[in-house]
Image: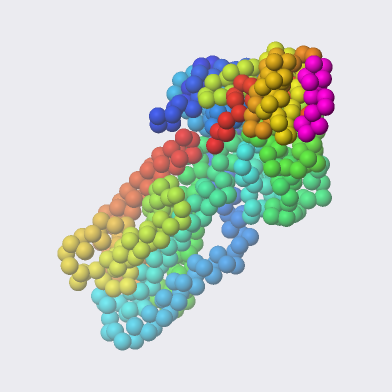
């Protein structure tokens, strides 16, 4: 569905995308992860033909981009990072007007409104003005709007940023429905649990290049030890120097918390016994650990 | 192709015609229709107050201006002012809102539309709004008995062309704007001086040569010459030249706006 090879894009002195190649198979969900400024959004914009790369080739929905980008976009739905619903229109008018940009007739658009509103959980909001919707409702309406052309592929730039857990779960549920319908999803996100839950494959991007790509569980298995013990509290530094560092296969003291990665957590847990002032948390490794290992803990903005 | 492919994306036929920009005009029309009341008051009240206030007020003090009563003179000037003002406001403030704050153009670009579709749509829409404002002034002038012949109907397509000239220029300014502040400068430093040298309120003939020539290089003086000739029967010559100057501004405005807005939206 999407093939990208050797994509590069420079803004002034800064090359924000430095040789990105990726493949997204039909009917799968692909997640592009990375810290702020990693080049995720620029990569997506290139794929949609909204900006012209300096070099590299892109094929989206079977046609070359940007050469035939308009044709490709006719088969694609886009959920942008920032809300751009039309505030002067009602919910229904937003859907109908957007369909018109795809060359659909008014009747074709109106025929779909009810189905799309039910899909988005906005069945009773058909005539509501946009300003009366909550953030979660707006997001769902944007998703419904992106479906007006019955797209084969959906591009979503941070689809659940700013949503509360209820709204986020509803969006996830809808995205899973789209996957079972055979559509292809491409999303960027900062939420590792979102990526782990939805994506068949994820690519971690940093400083304009993809530094790791695989299925989420495969990345976790490959990149990181299965058990994690986090320790914090008074005296954590001493414990880390004397025991933590030695007993863990990989370890890190970040701020006031020690992160210890290992296969067998028993010796570490034993070393904490009797140290009442230290608090500890034992958990399994997740995609966030992989992400932080590969991209570091430094703030990016 | 599997069966699933055949159903997915069945609606995926991009509009291939050259008139996709009509969707942008249509969108703006639908919004305008909702706000009809305030839109009409805004675009009519202002020039009408000028016309009635100055026309009767100053008009009663003046004998004639170039063979016309002052009301006739000012009416034809106000008509052009109205087209210019209305088209400029739309292509500056409203278009900038759609560009930056509402991200409307970004949304349209995610559909199979192009930057040129958007720019042409906005260009035509703002010109239509300008022409509508001008037509309303023409109607009032006819009601006051100022319109001398049916030749005034030629002003309808001409006002559209004048609207295209000013919406084109304004869209260039919008493309360059970082905030609404730039538009205040545009009105104060470009539109107002242009009005003073283009024969809207008083004839330009008695102005110093350099100022007069500056006025003749700008589109508004050509619009007022045409309006004065066609609406109130002032002597009219060089029609082709007047039309050509206005058309050049319209075309150049479109080309530059398309280029600059393209750079801004697809960087």
Q: Quadrant of the C terminus of chain A?
A: top right
Question: Viewed as shown, does residue A252 lie left or right of B162?
Answer: right
Residue toward you, A53 or A128: A53
Instruction: Identify the residue at image location x=34%, y=83%.
Output: B58
Q: Position of residue B41 (x, y in %)?
A: 54, 70
Q: Position of residue A221 (x, y in %)?
A: 73, 14
Question: Viewed as shown, does residue A52 lie left or right of A115?
Answer: left
Residue A73 in view here: yes
Residue sticking out furthest to the bottom: B61
A5 to B195, vertically: above or below: above
B163 to A204, vertically: above or below: below
B185 to B22, vertically: above or below: below
Instruction: Identify the residue at image location x=43%, y=46%.
Output: B175
Question: Viewed as shown, does residue B129 lie left or right of A104?
Answer: left
Q: Position of residue A169 (x, y in %)?
A: 79, 36
Is A270 contained in the magenta span?
yes
Is A145 contained in the magenta span?
no
Question: Viewed as shown, does residue A18 lie left or right of B216?
Answer: right
Which quadrant of the figure has residue A297?
A: top right
Q: Position of residue A242 (x, y in %)?
A: 69, 20
Which quadrant of the figure has residue B20?
A: top right
A251 to B29, vertically: above or below: above
Residue B158 in view here: no
Instruction: Identify the residue at image location x=58%, y=19%.
Output: A210
Q: Quadrant of the N terminus of chain A?
A: top right
Which quadrant of the figure has residue B193?
A: bottom left
Residue toward you, A30 or A184: A30
Q: Which residues are magenta?
A: A265-278
């Amino acid at each position: 569905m999407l093939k990208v090879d050797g994509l590069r894009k420079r803004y002034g002195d800064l090359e924000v995308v430095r040789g990105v190649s990726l493949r997204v198979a039909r009917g799968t969900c692909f997640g592009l992860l990375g810290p702020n400024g990693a080049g995720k959004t620029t990569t997506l914009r290139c794929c949609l033909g909204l900006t012209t790369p300096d070099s590299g080739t892109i094929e989206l929905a079977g046609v070359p981009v940007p050469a035939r980008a308009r044709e490709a976009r006719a088969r694609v739905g886009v959920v942008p990072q920032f809300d751009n619903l039309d505030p002067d229109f009602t919910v229904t008018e937003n859907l109908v007007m957007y369909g018109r940009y795809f060359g659909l007739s008014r009747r074709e658009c109106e025929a779909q409104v009810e189905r799309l509103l039910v899909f988005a959980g906005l069945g009773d909001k058909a005539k509501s003005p946009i300003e009366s919707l909550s953030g979660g409702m707006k997001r769902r309406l944007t998703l419904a709007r992106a479906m007006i052309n019955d797209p084969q592929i959906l591009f979503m730039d941070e689809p659940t940023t700013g949503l509360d857990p209820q709204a986020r779960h509803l969006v996830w549920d809808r995205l899973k429905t789209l996957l079972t319908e055979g559509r292809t999803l491409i999303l960027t996100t900062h939420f590792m649990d979102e990526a782990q839950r939805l994506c068949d494959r994820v690519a971690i991007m940093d400083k304009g290049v993809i530094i790791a790509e695989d299925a989420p569980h495969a990345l976790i298995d490959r990149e990181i030890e299965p058990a994690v013990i986090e320790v914090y509290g008074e005296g954590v530094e001493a414990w880390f120097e004397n025991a933590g560092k030695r007993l863990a296969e990989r370890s890190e003291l970040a701020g006031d918390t020690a992160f210890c990665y290992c296969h067998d957590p028993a010796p570490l847990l034993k070393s904490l016994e009797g140290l009442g002032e230290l608090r500890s948390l034992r958990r399994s490794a997740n995609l966030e650990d992989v992400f932080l290992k590969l991209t570091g803990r430094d703030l990016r903005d | 192709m599997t069966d699933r492919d055949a159903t997915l994306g069945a609606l995926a036929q991009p509009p291939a015609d050259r008139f996709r920009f009509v969707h942008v005009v249509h969108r703006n029309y639908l919004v305008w229709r909702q706000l009809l009341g305030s839109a009409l008051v805004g675009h009519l009240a202002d020039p009408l107050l000028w016309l009635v206030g100055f026309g009767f007020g100053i008009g009663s003090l003046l004998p004639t201006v170039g063979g016309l009563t002052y009301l006739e003179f000012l009416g034809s000037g106000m008509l052009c002012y109205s087209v210019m003002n209305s088209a400029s406001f739309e292509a500056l403030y409203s278009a900038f809102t759609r560009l930056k704050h509402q991200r409307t153009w970004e949304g349209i670009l995610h559909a199979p539309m192009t930057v040129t579709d958007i720019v042409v749509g906005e260009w035509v829409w703002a010109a239509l709004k300008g022409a509508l404002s001008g037509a309303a002034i023409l109607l009032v002038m006819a009601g006051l008995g100022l319109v001398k012949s049916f030749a005034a109907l030629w002003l309808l397509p001409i006002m559209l062309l004048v609207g295209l000239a000013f919406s084109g220029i304004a869209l260039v300014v919008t493309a360059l704007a970082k905030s609404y502040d730039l538009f205040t400068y545009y009105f104060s430093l470009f539109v107002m001086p242009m009005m003073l040298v283009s024969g809207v309120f008083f004839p330009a003939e008695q102005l110093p040569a350099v100022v007069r020539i500056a006025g003749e290089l700008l589109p508004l003086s050509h619009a007022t010459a045409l309006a004065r000739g066609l609406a109130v029967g002032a002597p009219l010559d060089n029609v082709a030249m007047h039309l050509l100057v206005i058309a050049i501004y319209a075309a150049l405005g479109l080309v530059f706006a398309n280029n600059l807005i393209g750079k801004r939206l697809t960087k």
